[in-house]
Image (cartoon, rainbow, N blue to C red):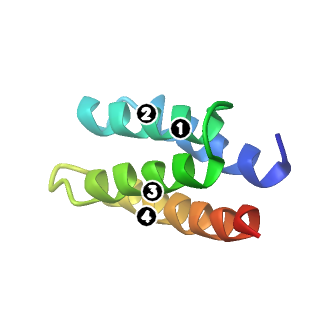
Amino acid sequence: MDAEVEAIVQIMDDIINDTSVPRNIRRSVAQAKELVLKKEGDPVVNVTEAIYLLDEASNDINMPMHTRTQVWQIMGALESYREKIKG
């Protein structure tokens, strides 16, 4: 795993372990993390699915603002990573 993915996963872990974040949002972030780390399938498709999951979660009105900022940061990093692995 390269350093870029490690940094993204670390931020995801911070959200997943933050009990002030609603459970459904933590679950979405955990699912996105699984997609990013998934070895099977096309990595571009997996990262794109993760971005869509995080986008949906970021629209939840119950999300704390600091978490929303983190999710946007993750989405931006994933979009950059996706462009890099595309090619």
Q: How crowded is mark 3: few (under 14 residues within 10 Å), some or many (20 or more)?
A: many
To which quarter of the image does residue 85 belong?
A: bottom right
Residue occupied by mark 3: 51
Q: How far apart are marks 1 and 2 (CA)?
A: 6 Å
Residue at the (82%, 39%) spot, across then down: 1
Q: Residues within 10 Å of mark 4 (few under 14, many from 20)?
A: few
Residue at the (48%, 28%) spot, across then down: 17
To which quarter of the image does residue 71 belong?
A: bottom left
Viewer-nearest of labels 4 and 2?
Answer: 2
Badge count: 4
Q: Do the residues labelled 4 and 3 touch (CB within 8 Å)?
A: no
Q: How far apart are marks 4 and 2 (CA)?
A: 18 Å
Residue at disc 3, secondary structure: helix
Q: Do the residues labelled 1 and 2 touch (CB within 8 Å)?
A: yes
Q: Of residues 48 and 8, which is closer to you in this image? A: 48
Residue at disc 1, secondary structure: helix
Q: How far apart are marks 4 and 3 (CA)?
A: 14 Å
Residue occupied by mark 4: 69
Q: How far apart are marks 4 and 1 (CA)?
A: 21 Å
Residue at the (53%, 64%) spot, across then down: 73
Residue occupied by mark 1: 35
In the rendered image, which quarter contains the C terminus?
A: bottom right
Q: Which of marks 4 and 2 is nearer the N terminus?
A: 2
Q: Tell me which amino acid carries mark 1.
A: Leu
Q: Of residues 48 and 42, which is closer to you in this image? A: 42
Q: Do the residues labelled 3 and 2 touch (CB within 8 Å)?
A: no
Q: Does 13 sit above or below residue 77? A: above
Q: Are marks 1 and 3 in contact (CB under 8 Å)?
A: no
Q: Which of marks 3 and 2 is nearer the N terminus?
A: 2
Residue occupied by mark 2: 31
